[in-house]
Image (cartoon, rainbow, N blue to C red):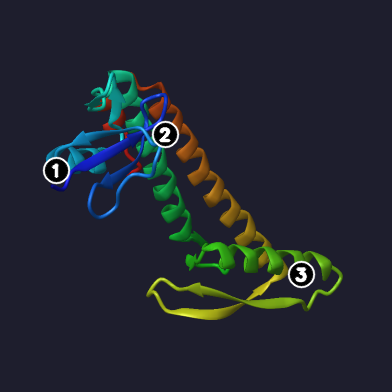
Amino acid sequence: MRQKQAAYDSSGAIFAFYDTIDSPAPEGVDTIDISEAEWQAAIESQRYTVVNGVLTPPAAPTAAELLAAAQSAKVAELSAACKAAIYAGFTSKALGASYSYPAKDTDQQNLASSVIDSLLNASNAEWATPFWCADASGAWAFRMHTAAQIQQVGKEGKAAILSAMARNQSLAAAVMAAATVDEVDAIAWA
């Protein structure tokens, strides 16, 4: 008759499951017989152990463990929201009216390159560069920027990114200072 088994080490940690017919345990491996239901539960949780020869379910998480898990998840959520806020771009009036600028990784690199190029060509009063931006109607196009204009866009882009990063840091600090899961859950980017 088929029998499910759990293999465990000297600390009681389960490291493998076997079936006496389909996949028998190797010689010398400590195992206990378990029911189909116990096998399914142990597979799903992966925190079961063997204590005194008995399959033992994981202890319920403590309040501190639940808080730490909630804090970790919330910090990750806030970091993703920060990245999304940065990637949403920023606005600048460097061209005389409000224009939207992209700020994904490549956009930031392109802007930094344009600012550097403007500085390297400081002695050339005719220097200009096209840069991708959208007008108030949302029409994206390469628009010419003078050295002063692209430098202003660079400053405003950096300020927008630093603002998002500071907000993320502040919210993450609030998360880590929270004393309950409910306090953690109440913290949001928006």
Image quadrant where residue 189 sits:
top left
Locate residue 23 relative to residue 152 in the image: left or right: left
Does dot 3 land on a helix, a strand or a loop? helix
- What label sits on residue 36 in the rendered view? 1
Does dot 2 land on a helix, a strand or a loop? helix
Looking at the image, tell me whether mark 1 or mark 2 is earlier in sequence order: 1
Q: Amino acid at mark 1?
A: Glu
Locate residue 43 relative to residue 103 in the image: left or right: left
Q: How busy is the neighbourhood of tag 3: few (under 14 within 10 Å), some, or many (20 plus)?
A: some
Q: Amino acid at mark 3?
A: Asp
Marks 3/2: CA–CA distance: 36 Å
Q: Which residue is mark 3?
A: 117
The C terminus lies in quadrant: top left
Where residue 33 appears, x then y in whole percent? Answer: 21, 35
Image quadrant where residue 79 sits:
top left
The mark lying in front, picked from 3 and 2, is 2
